[in-house]
Image (cartoon, rainbow, N blue to C red):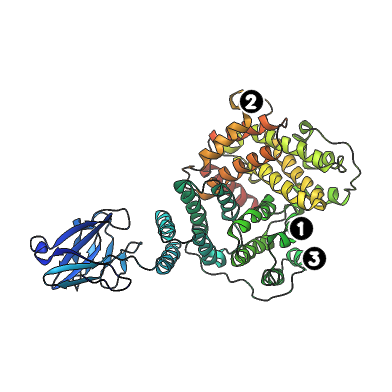
């Protein structure tokens, strides 16, 4: 038979082949195609359900027009007239049919690549609100099979979800940065590469599922770093986003904007360090995505989170920070050792850090070593206590922030050295706060390893298949492991490597209590009692 342009008609069966059961499975070129009779019509579709591959030849046909095909495994339903999935998610591929001289002919040609790519991206967008994890992976795979850029799936996800972040960026931003950084080294492994991209998309989807749109201001101003920092300080989202839009629309890239965001993030001990961590992670994330639209969406999310960030340096526990920052003169030559930074109040730790103000890099190493020691020596009783006060509600994730924050600010301060005072003193806020929740007598032996870097690299590989549903936990497993690995590879052969590897190992293998049923009730009763 002469084929029409862009079609691939094949003679696949005779009408008589359908007389017994009304259906037949055709196997050709790796495809399984279900051909069946519905009234006086012949219809054809993939035999494998697009959900989990169950044979639709075992399904049921019904509906008003006899064109509703039901997969009897999970009850997905497909309208073969319109092509719509009536119950379920993924679309079912149909095939054009024509009958001639008692023979059934199917057009087996694939849709144009551009159409297949568009369909995959649109189907992905349709699945975000329901957080269809396995479907995300399938749609990315379909996109890639059609010749599309799999990163376009993430770009589309960011565009679809950006306005649903009511308070700005979440852990989805830094986790995605780390996933994409790991993925760059795994591009020759299709399974790992797809897994990392699926994790990234699913985190954005989870954090915005069923959320309404919280639109960003649309004004435009020429980028002005001081203006942006001032707008964030004033919690003026309209002005801050206007500066950002002006910068992006004028062609600026993240390296041109980073200093302004870093200054705003470190202007306060903000959001328990998240502000600076997110700012640093924008570096790899925007480089890998590489497009101005994603930069704008991510920048808007980050700007909003800076606007809403808590400013812990304004509460009594960290009030010494402002005084220490004002007194920083850059002349101190007395670098504190790590042991001295592991203990003491916030004020005492800040004073010790300030004594080495002329040697920020050396102070940083001591502070990082202290943070690793505290992480290793976290006293688990505080995680398990049910009668502690709100101020004593400390857990594993709180201790990881010292190290991830330290990693982020080192990278930022290497590019913007004038931010070292803020960065070091804010690490000191972590150290002073956490010092009272450590166990100095903890036996380090079970957690020590002979090859620290090798152990961390093994941990990083294992984190890829973390098996944790709760995204905030998974992101901390990833972020801490990635940060420790980056610190150790950037600063080889340091004395603190064994402590860092041991701390990571203990964290990754220890129980992580995430819901405190009795503690919550205890604190609620105390709180209401105090209200009078």
Work out whether residue 129 or residue 527 is closer to the camera in this orientation and state it: 129
Q: Is residue 349 visible?
A: no
Residue under numbered circle 3: 226
Work out whether residue 61 or residue 94 is closer to the camera in this orientation and state it: 94
Q: Which mark is residue 463?
A: none
Q: Secondary structure at mark 1?
A: helix
Q: Position of residue 337 (x, y in %)?
A: 80, 32
Locate residue 441: give its quadrant.
top right
Please identify the quadrant where the N terminus is shown. Answer: bottom left
Locate residue 385: give its quadrant.
top right
Residue 370 appears left or right of 191: right
Locate residue 29: give its quadrant.
bottom left
Mark 1 vs mark 3, CA separation in Å = 9 Å
Residue at the spot x=89%, y=38% of the render? 333
Q: Mark 2 or mark 1: which is in front?
A: 1
Q: Position of residue 193 (x, y in %)?
A: 49, 49
- Name which of mark 3 and mark 2 comes first in the sequence: 3
Residue 222 appears left or right of 189: right
Residue under numbered circle 1: 263
Is 186 drawn above or below residue 146 in the view shown?
above
Q: Position of residue 481 (x, y in %)?
A: 60, 40
Quick one: which residue is furthest to the bottom in this view? 219
- Name which of mark 1 and mark 3 comes first in the sequence: 3
Residue under numbered circle 2: 444
Mark 3 vs mark 2, CA separation in Å = 47 Å
Mark 1 nearby-residue class (10 Å; few <14, some 14–19, many ≥20): many
């Amino acid at each position: 038979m002469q084929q029409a342009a862009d079609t691939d008609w094949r003679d696949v069966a005779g009408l008589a082949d359908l007389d017994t059961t009304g259906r037949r499975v055709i196997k050709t070129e790796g495809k399984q195609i279900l051909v069946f009779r519905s009234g006086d019509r012949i219809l054809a579709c993939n035999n494998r359900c697009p959900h989990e591959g169950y044979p639709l030849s075992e399904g049921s046909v019904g509906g008003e027009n006899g064109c509703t095909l039901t997969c009897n495994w999970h009850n997905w339903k497909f309208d073969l007239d319109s092509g719509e999935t009536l119950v379920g998610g993924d679309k079912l591929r149909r095939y054009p049919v024509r009958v001639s001289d008692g023979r059934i002919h199917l057009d087996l040609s694939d849709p144009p690549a551009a159409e297949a790519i568009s369909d995959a991206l649109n189907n992905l967008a349709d699945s975000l609100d329901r957080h269809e994890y396995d479907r995300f992976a399938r749609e990315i795979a379909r996109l890639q099979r059609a010749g599309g850029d799999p990163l376009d799936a993430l770009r589309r996800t960011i565009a679809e979800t950006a306005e649903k972040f009511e308070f700005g960026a979440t852990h989805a931003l830094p986790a995605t940065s780390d996933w994409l950084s790991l993925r760059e080294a795994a591009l020759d492994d299709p399974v790992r590469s797809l897994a990392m991209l699926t994790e990234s998309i699913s985190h954005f989807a989870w954090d915005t599922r069923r959320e309404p749109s919280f639109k960003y201001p649309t004004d435009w101003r020429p980028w002005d770093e001081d203006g942006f920092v001032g707008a964030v300080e004033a919690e003026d989202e309209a002005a801050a986003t206007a500066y950002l839009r002006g910068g992006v629309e004028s062609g600026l890239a993240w390296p041109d904007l980073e200093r302004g965001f870093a200054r705003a993030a470190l202007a306060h001990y903000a959001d328990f360090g998240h502000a600076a961590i997110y700012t640093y992670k924008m570096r790899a994330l925007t480089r890998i995505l590489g497009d101005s639209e994603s930069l704008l969406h991510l920048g808007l999310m980050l700007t909003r989170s800076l606007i809403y960030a808590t400013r812990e340096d304004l509460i009594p526990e960290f009030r010494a920070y402002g005084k220490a920052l004002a007194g920083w003169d850059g002349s101190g030559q007395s670098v504190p050792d790590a042991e001295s930074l592991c203990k003491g109040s916030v004020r005492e730790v800040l004073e010790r850090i300030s004594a080495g103000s002329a040697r920020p890099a050396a102070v940083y190493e001591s502070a990082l070593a202290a943070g690793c020691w505290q992480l290793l020596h976290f006293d688990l009783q505080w995680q398990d206590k049910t009668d502690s006060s709100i101020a004593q509600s400390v857990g594993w994730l709180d201790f990881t922030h010292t190290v991830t924050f330290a990693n982020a600010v080192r990278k930022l301060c290497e590019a913007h050295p004038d931010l070292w005072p803020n960065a070091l003193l804010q690490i000191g806020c972590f150290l002073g706060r956490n010092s009272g929740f450590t166990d100095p007598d903890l036996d380090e032996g079970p957690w020590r390893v002979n090859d620290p870097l090798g152990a961390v690299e093994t941990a990083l590989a294992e984190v890829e298949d973390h098996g944790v549903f709760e995204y905030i936990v998974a992101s901390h497993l990833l972020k801490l492991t990635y940060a420790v690995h980056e610190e150790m590879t950037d600063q080889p052969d340091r004395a603190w490597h064994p402590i860092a590897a041991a701390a990571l190992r203990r964290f990754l293998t220890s129980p992580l209590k995430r819901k405190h049923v009795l503690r919550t009730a205890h604190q609620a009763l105390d709180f209401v009692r105090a209200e009078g």
